Image (cartoon, helix red, strand yellow):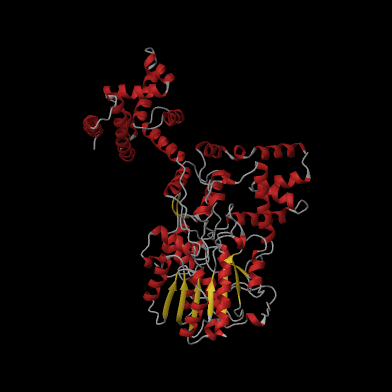
């Protein structure tokens, strides 16, 4: 297509659009709407030109050389008038420059014409001027590309938050929520600062510490602050840790800060009622900070009890340095066996309370990164034997590169991840991934450290993987299923949307981890097992038992979400189970009469398994982190109540 034909096409379509605008105005007038003719014509005309201009601009950038494009006169006499009016109304100074000064130089006239052209296409004059200042006036396609880049960077991608408010569904929901809600909203100015270098990015307090260091007047506390700030840790986190442990060496402070960060990022869904603006807390800003600090303090006090590494009583690749011997109280011994799960990082005293209700059994804290390519820090209390465990085979991939070998080609050297973070109930938006691509393409070679830090924050937050040059993407539902140990298309069987599939998967067990713990039941129940599954979700425990080769004779599943119940029912049918599946929707209504009836029908339960909601337990909840007294997490007491009934009627 020649340039003359492109220009002709532009004006043919433009003329048709102009005629349609007049017809549209007449239609509005016939219904009694009043518009100034010029106001209506310009408004509707400019919206159409923006659409048309962008399409033609994309074609030109892809197909036309710089020399050809610079020779085109895009502006008719009529459009020049309209564009000049638009520029003048937006900027009086520009009016004087463009139309008020008849003796302006030819270069000013060309600049004015170019500004009018791009403003007429619908772009903001501020972006047009900035692009022209940076690239000069001789290369329109480069200017257009720059304007589109600035427009992309101005748009902040919205988060996609889960809207599932089921208190009984699946034990927990995975989400980063408020603490990370503004991590993907860097402004254009902030990105420009990052591109200029790390010194510009440093906070004023960080710069002050650097100045003090040069003069040799740093105190011991300030030296620790500067050391950790230079390592990339937020000064706020460092100050909180130093306030609590002023005499602690830097290496130990690092561990405490990491624990606090894990607590903030511990992934659990908050119900709609809890997603309130942060200003709902009454009182002064000081009291708010004090409450926030006390909350962090409680998280750290509880977290330092967690083992490191988090391998519980042992994982296939690693055993504790000393052989674990545990003796259970008589009333806790099975059958029936029980298996309870919840998030590892909880408010102070929660696991002590859970342990006290569950026969004072010590929790087993395990991170699923030892069983898969994604982390999932969980605590388990159970009365299962801990000897002679075995993993599922074939062994799952344990690193990102093993799970997604094609990504290795595109993986940048400055992305050190070999594990994904905990699977969530939502994914990153397409705007965010496009924004990352745009930012990377503006850098020659490796991007500046500040840009790398920004991108790594987003990659860790949303579990993004590299799928092309400068291109990241969120995980697909079937990829999440693989990481969590479910069969391919497991969640598709419920006939639910792609969004709901992510929600259901984010609330599930990691099957390989759970199967390792439950593997001891294969020899105990060689002819099959009766299971009571509380807060069943998408059937992680049932899938684990099936993959272990343990026959499911009878499964009673209690799950609030109908979509999740449909998924479990579909899986049951697709795997040709020969046993019986019975489902209910509310644990609070599962009373002694129901337990007695089912016990007499199936002969008693051999295993009670489940994980109650973590909504009020996880570190991301800054509004109603009320522990086991919270509205949703108090359902733990129903787990204990039902377990007690099962034991009574079995006896």
Residue that extends furthest to the top in the rendered view of this protein: 103
**Residue 584 in sight in this render:** yes
Q: Is residue 152 above or below residue 465?
A: above
Choose top left, top right, bottom left or bottom right for residue 538.
bottom left
**Residue at the front extreme, as displayed:** 593
Give x and y (percent) for residue 23: 21, 31
Residue farthest toward the bottom in the current orientation of the protein = 527
For the C terminus, the quadrant is bottom right
Query: In this orientation, which residue lies closer to the viewer: 407 or 99?
Result: 99
227 up-or-down from 67: above or below: below
Q: Is residue 395 visible?
A: no
| For residue 126, side relative to residue 200 (left or right) | left
Residue 253 % position (x, y) = 71, 54
Q: Nearer the viewer, residue 442 or 31?
A: 31
Q: Residue at x 54, y 44 (%)?
A: 451
Q: Quadrant of the N terminus?
A: top left
Name which quarter of the figure residue 114 lies in: top left
Q: How many marks?
A: 0
- Name the residue nearer the viewer: 240 or 273: 273
Q: Measured from the top left, where is residue 528 in percent x and y?
A: 48, 84
User: Image point 46% across, 84% down: which residue?
Assistant: 601
Q: Nearer the viewer, residue 60 or 459?
A: 459
Residue located 62% across and 54% down the image: 261
Give the image location of residue 112, x and y in percent.
Answer: 38, 22
Left or right: 171 in relation to 109: right
Left or right: 477 as drawn, with respect to 400: left
The answer to whether residue 258 is left or right of residue 67 is: right
Q: Residue 262, relative to residue 158: is it above or below?
A: below
């Amino acid at each position: 297509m020649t340039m003359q034909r492109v220009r002709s096409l532009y004006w043919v379509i433009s003329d048709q659009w102009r005629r349609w605008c007049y017809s549209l105005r007449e239609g509005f007038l016939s219904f009694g709407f009043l518009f100034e003719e010029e106001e209506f014509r310009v408004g509707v005309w400019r919206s159409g030109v923006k659409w048309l201009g962008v399409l033609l601009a994309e074609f030109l950038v892809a197909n036309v050389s710089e020399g050809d494009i610079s020779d085109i006169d895009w502006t008719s006499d009529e459009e020049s008038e309209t564009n000049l009016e638009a520029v003048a109304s937006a900027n009086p100074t520009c009016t004087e420059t463009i139309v008020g000064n008849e003796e302006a130089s030819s270069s000013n006239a060309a600049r004015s014409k170019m500004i009018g052209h791009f403003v007429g296409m619908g772009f903001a004059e501020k972006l047009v001027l900035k692009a022209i200042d940076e690239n000069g006036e001789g290369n329109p396609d480069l200017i257009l590309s720059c304007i589109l880049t600035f427009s992309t960077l101005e748009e902040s991608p919205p988060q996609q938050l889960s809207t599932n408010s089921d208190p009984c569904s699946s034990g927990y929901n995975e989400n980063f929520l408020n603490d990370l809600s503004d991590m993907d909203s860097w402004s254009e100015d902030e990105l420009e600062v990052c591109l200029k270098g790390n010194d510009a990015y440093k906070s004023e307090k960080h710069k002050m510490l650097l100045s003090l260091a040069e003069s040799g007047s740093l105190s011991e506390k300030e030296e620790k602050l500067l050391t950790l700030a230079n390592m990339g840790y937020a000064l706020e986190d460092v100050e909180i840790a130093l306030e609590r442990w002023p005499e602690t060496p830097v290496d130990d402070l690092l561990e405490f800060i990491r624990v606090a960060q894990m607590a903030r990022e511990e992934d659990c869904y908050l119900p709609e009622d809890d997603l309130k603006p942060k200003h709902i807390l009454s009182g002064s800003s000081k009291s708010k900070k004090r409450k926030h600090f006390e909350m962090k303090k409680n998280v750290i006090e509880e977290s330092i009890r967690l083992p490191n590494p988090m391998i519980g009583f042992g994982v296939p690749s690693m055993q504790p340095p000393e052989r674990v011997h545990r003796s259970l109280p008589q009333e806790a011994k099975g059958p029936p066996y029980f298996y309870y799960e919840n998030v590892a990082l909880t408010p102070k005293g929660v696991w002590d309370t859970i342990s006290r209700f569950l026969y004072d059994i010590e929790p087993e804290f395990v991170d699923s990164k030892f069983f898969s390519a994604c982390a999932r820090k969980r605590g388990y209390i159970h009365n299962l034997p801990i000897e002679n465990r075995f993993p599922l085979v074939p062994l799952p991939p344990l690193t990102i590169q093993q799970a997604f070998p094609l990504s290795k080609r595109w993986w940048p050297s400055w992305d050190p991840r070999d594990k994904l973070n905990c699977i969530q109930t939502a994914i990153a938006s397409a705007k965010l991934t496009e924004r990352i691509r745009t930012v990377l393409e503006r850098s020659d070679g490796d991007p500046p450290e500040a840009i790398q830090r920004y991108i790594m924050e987003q990659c860790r937050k949303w579990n993004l993987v590299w799928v092309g040059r400068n291109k990241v993407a969120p995980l697909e539902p079937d990829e999440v299923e693989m990481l969590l140990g479910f069969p391919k298309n497991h969640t598709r069987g419920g006939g639910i949307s792609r969004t709901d599939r992510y929600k259901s998967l984010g609330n599930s067990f990691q099957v390989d981890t759970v199967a390792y713990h439950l593997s001891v039941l294969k020899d105990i129940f060689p002819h099959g097992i009766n299971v009571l599954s509380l807060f069943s979700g998408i059937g992680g425990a049932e899938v684990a038992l099936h993959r272990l080769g343990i026959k499911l004779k009878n499964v009673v599943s209690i799950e609030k979400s109908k979509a999740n119940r449909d998924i479990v029912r579909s899986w049951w049918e697709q795997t040709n189970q020969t046993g019986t599946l019975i489902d209910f929707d509310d644990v609070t209504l599962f009373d002694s009469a129901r337990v007695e009836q089912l016990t007499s029908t199936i002969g008693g339960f051999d295993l009670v398994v489940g994980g109650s909601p973590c909504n009020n337990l996880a570190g991301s909840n800054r509004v109603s982190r009320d522990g086991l007294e919270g509205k949703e997490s108090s359902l733990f007491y129903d787990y204990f109540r039902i377990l007690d009934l099962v034991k009574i009627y079995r006896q």
